[in-house]
Image (tube, rainbow, N blue to C red):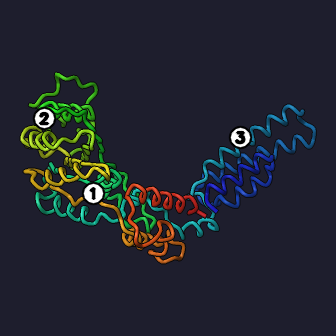
Amino acid sequence: MSLEDLQCELQNLVADASYDKAFQRLKEIVGRKDNNELYRDIIAVQARYSEAKRASNLNLIDLKEISQHFSHVAYALLWLIGRISIDELSDLYLSEAKLHRAIPTVHSLTCNRSRQKSAFDEYHLFEPGPAEKFHFFYLYGDTRQGHESLFKRFAHDLNGLVNSRWRQGATPSNREPLFKLCKPEFSESPRMFEMYVLRDLFTCFFEPVNELQINTGSRLIDLLESPEIKSLGPNGQVFILLTIDDFNWRKEVTPLTVKRLFEGFYKCQLPPSAPRFFFFFGLKYSKTNTDVKGEVRTAIDTAEYGKPLAELGPLTILEIGEWFSRYEVLCGGKEALEMATQLFGTQNASYDMADVEIKLLEIIEKHNKRLLI
């Protein structure tokens, strides 16, 4: 039984006006521990309820007053029930709760992508090194392969939010990276497309932005005036995903725009007080658009700037099984591959990351809801 189920049981007792039973169950569920404020409040409310019952039994108050007293008790009980958390559980229930661990939902993003993650980690740790303030990567693949979720996984991982410490009941880090998502208006002119990219980018950090503030002389260092960025300090990170898809990709325009950005906007020295910037150029194409797929591959292969990560493709059932092998608590006693096959089908199929992540998130949330008791 989950904490939510326990609260529902208690709420039903209140709805049935079974106040004596509600107080009895509340005291069983909530621990009588030192400095347990909730338990003390339960006793105080129960005392007022008992006094109201005594007065009613002795005909010391009329029916209207009785109704008012019991109405107040009902509201007080609902307030107490809403305050129950794992910290207030009695030893009987707490011992059960300690056998279980919640899995942070960000772990739904950790299925495979080992090639991309290894390349990302190796690059920012060893090639320019962690002291480097600016990093630029290419993410590319069809629209169903989770560009945005991988982008967020990288950020959460750098901030210590994706690790195995949940198994020890550790509280996740509260360090949240700064995410910005951009999808600029398209232009056939490389110069104007660059302007639209910069406008979209500056709008993420400043409000309002007018056309006169943005020009090809704008530099990355200008973003440091943003209040959001100022608050991060030198240990902060800014993750920016610039998405280009079938609708705003042109082989004559997009690669040239990226080159112009590198030789203009990105070409500046950031001070030691600046956070680190991680720019991702997310290139998407529909599964059937083989022309754009080929053009994107050629553009990345011949790019002068930026770090390409391996193309994002569908997952195999073995790769999904590997994920379950790291989260055996979700398998219900089944083997990891058996669990993956039960949920996703045969071992011969392939699965888009967008579909896989939805199911993994559902499984984690279902697990977390039934954890406490």
Residue 230 figure quarter? top left
- Residue 9 % position (x, y): 71, 54
In this rendering, the label closer to the viewer, 2 or 3? 2
Q: Earlier in the sequence, mark 2 or mark 3?
A: 3
**Residue 158 marker:** 1
Element carrying mark 1: helix
Task: Name the residue that disc number 2 marks.
Answer: 190
In this rendering, the label closer to the viewer, 3 or 1? 1
Amino acid type, label 3: Tyr
Please indicate whether residue 317 sits to the left or right of residue 193 in the image: right
Residue 122 visible (yes or no):
yes
Real-space Cα distance between discs 1 and 2? 34 Å
Residue 270 visible (yes or no):
no
Residue, x 42% and y 73% (percent of image)? 347
**Residue 75 marker:** 3
Q: Are marks 3 and 1 in contact (CB under 8 Å)?
A: no
Element carrying mark 3: helix
Q: Are marks 2 and 3 in contact (CB under 8 Å)?
A: no
Mark 3 is surrounded, within 10 Å at the Cα level, by few (under 14), some (14 to 19) or many (20 or more) other residues, namely: few
